[in-house]
Amino acid sequence: MTARLVVLVSGSGTNLQALLDACADPGYGATVVAVGADRDGIAGLTRAQDAGVPTFVARVPDYPSRQAWDEGFTELVAEHKPDLVIGAGFLKLVGEAFLDRFGGRYVNTHNALLPAFPGMHGPRDALAYGVKLAGATLHFVDGGVDTGPIIAQVAVPVLDDDTEDTLSERIKEAERAQLVDFVGRLSRDGWTINGRKVRVG
């Protein structure tokens, strides 16, 4: 059985593209059945449309409240019956309705080695702190900011002459490879979550 993926994007969709490319291999075990976004006119939606994948957009300003957006967005995702929901550069925090429906199935990638440096500026914060290893974390999403159970991590050395941009680019490459690898593993082999511990297979 092929796992159904709904991928959420807010920007260029490079992680989405990597997943679309991986899903082209029948052995990967997953297919992207829809792509959702929180804004119009982004490259991520164009990538999905070019691949023949259905898209939907739910903009927060179009709803009377953030809770109403969360409930509406949850229904839009649910229509596609996903086995996994993948945050691929999706910049909106989901709320209670979404997590009630998709908790334990919503995967996000973060550009730092959690629990260090959560939030929007992982590479910048890592550089400022002077760490020697940065990296990326794949985790299930819970109600906190980058606090959910960790699926996988990959380390990226910090070089003496790194800037935020150079470090971010190297993290993105490692992050993308990890995302593709583990979404495939989760899809093919399944997973269990026991407290904070995630076991794949």
Image (cartoon, rainbow, N blue to C red):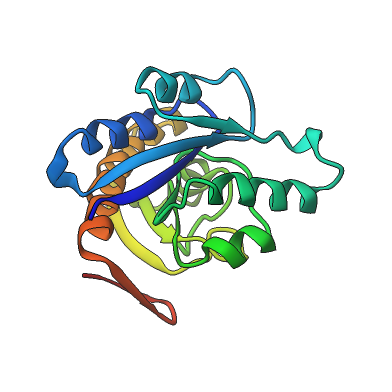
Q: Nearer the viewer, residue 130 or 107?
A: 107
Q: Nearer the viewer, residue 116 or 55?
A: 55
Residue 102, compared with residue 164, is above or below; it is below
Residue occupying image coordinates x 30% and y 37%: 19
Q: Is residue 41 visible?
A: yes
Q: Is residue 113 visible?
A: no
Left or right, 57 with respect to 199, comes to right
Image location (x, y in percent) of residue 52: 37, 23
Q: Kindly give the residue lying farthest to the left in the view shown.
A: 27
Residue 78, compared with residue 116, is above or below; it is above
- Quadrant (top left, top right, bottom left, bottom right) of the N terminus: bottom left
Image location (x, y in percent) of residue 104: 46, 67
Residue occupying image coordinates x 79% and y 50%: 68
Residue occupying image coordinates x 15% and y 41%: 26
Toward which corner of the image does residue 201 lie, by quadrant? bottom left
Residue occupying image coordinates x 38% and y 55%: 137
Residue 38, compared with residue 138, is above or below; it is above
| Number of numbered discs visible in the structure rendering | 0
Q: Kindly give the residue lying farthest to the bottom in the view shown.
A: 195
Left or right, 99 with respect to 175, comes to right
Image location (x, y in percent) of residue 142: 56, 65
Q: Nearer the viewer, residue 125 or 181?
A: 181
